[in-house]
Amino acid sequence: IFSRPPYLPPSSALSSPSPKRFVVMAACLHYLKSLPVLFFFFHVICAQVPYHDCLTTALNYTSNSTYENNLNRLLASLRENASFTGFYNTSVGKGADQVHGLVQCYKDISAGDCSTCADSAASQILELCPNSKAAVIWFDNCLLRYTSFNFFGIIDESKNSYVDGDSIPNPVQFKQLLRSFFNNLSMSATTKNSTLMYATGYVWYTDNITLYGLVECTGDLSLKSCDSCLKTSITTIWQCCSDRESARILSPSCVIRYEIYPFYGSLTPAPARPASSPPPPPANQSTTPSTPDNFP
């Protein structure tokens, strides 16, 4: 079970800890039927695509206010600058009306796709979260986030969990593989030689099932903070979602995801598992934290 606090400035900016609530978001109603006991422990919400969190515990702004004007200027700036490097963060305004935000595209998409995703995110976050002073939205190609306080460089520990697909065969074995797989991806993304804080890879599970994974942190974090965010997300996915064919843990600071089909890069399937291969140890995985050619 994992905890998620009400959305307030990070604990370093609070005088006392806030109470916690438990949350899990599931993409498929049929999965919820298999979790009758868990309803007593945390609030279950069916996911809506695009994935988003309006952070309803944050204060709302008034229409036609200075804050709304600054937010619109911020979103316009994020849209305009996203495709240059794939990451952009900025602040607009002063004092209580200041707005801070960032946009990040996943490293394996083109600059054109990044620009398209940033445009969609900036438009839809206002439609999905009207008058919210803090919100985050995740697409398959990008994420966009804004708040009324300066969060740059600070880990947001809130976690939203989404699951999909059928049950995975032999879940006990799969759970062990999943943790070592994501641990290795995390190490690839957070080594001193990595400036991207991003890695993808695959590992064979059975002759017919190949697991594909992705980990990524937002560009405002340090390698140490990225490592911390990914570790808590790996623990979350291992605890909540490791018996399904598909799952993702979405945080405002980092993302991890796995599928049984290729969903990143060129979408080329992994090579077939050799017939004589034993059950795959973690070393069989392939990770790709290298610099993409899509951005300057």
Image (cartoon, rainbow, N blue to C red):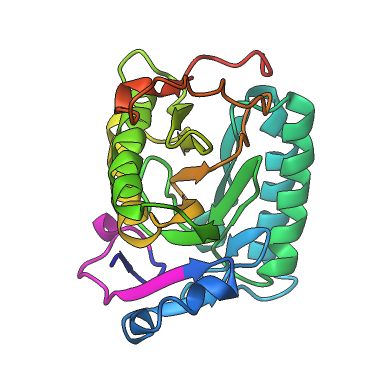
Q: In which quarter of the image is residue 189?
A: top left
Figure check: 56 above or below 95: below
Query: Is residue 28 depicted above or below 295 in this figure?
Result: below
Q: Which residue lies furthest to the bottom in this view?
A: 40
Asked whether, in this view, residue 86 is left or right of residue 241, the answer is: right
- The answer to whether any part of residue 27 appears in the image is yes
Quarter of image, res 68: bottom right
At horizontal 69% and vertical 18% (from top left) the residue drawn is 294
With 104 as the anchor, is 288 left or right in this view?
Answer: left
- The residue under the point 60% across, 70% down is 132
The answer to whether residue 56 is seen in the rendering is: no
Screen quadrant of the N terminus: bottom left
Q: Please state the horizontal and vertical placement of residue 249, each as a whole percent of the image.
A: 45, 53
Residue at image point 54% right, 59% down: 166
Quarter of the figure that contains the C terminus: top right
Q: Was residue 220 drawn as part of the magenta stretch in this picture?
A: no
Query: Is 37 on the left-hand or right-hand side of 219?
Result: left
Work out whether residue 263 or residue 84 is closer to the camera in this orientation and state it.
263
Percent from the top left, x then y, of residue 255?
47, 44
Residue 220 is situated, as x and y percent measured from the top left of the image, at: 44, 35
Report the front residue among 16 and 260.
260
For residue 14: magenta? yes
The region drawn magenta spans: 9-24
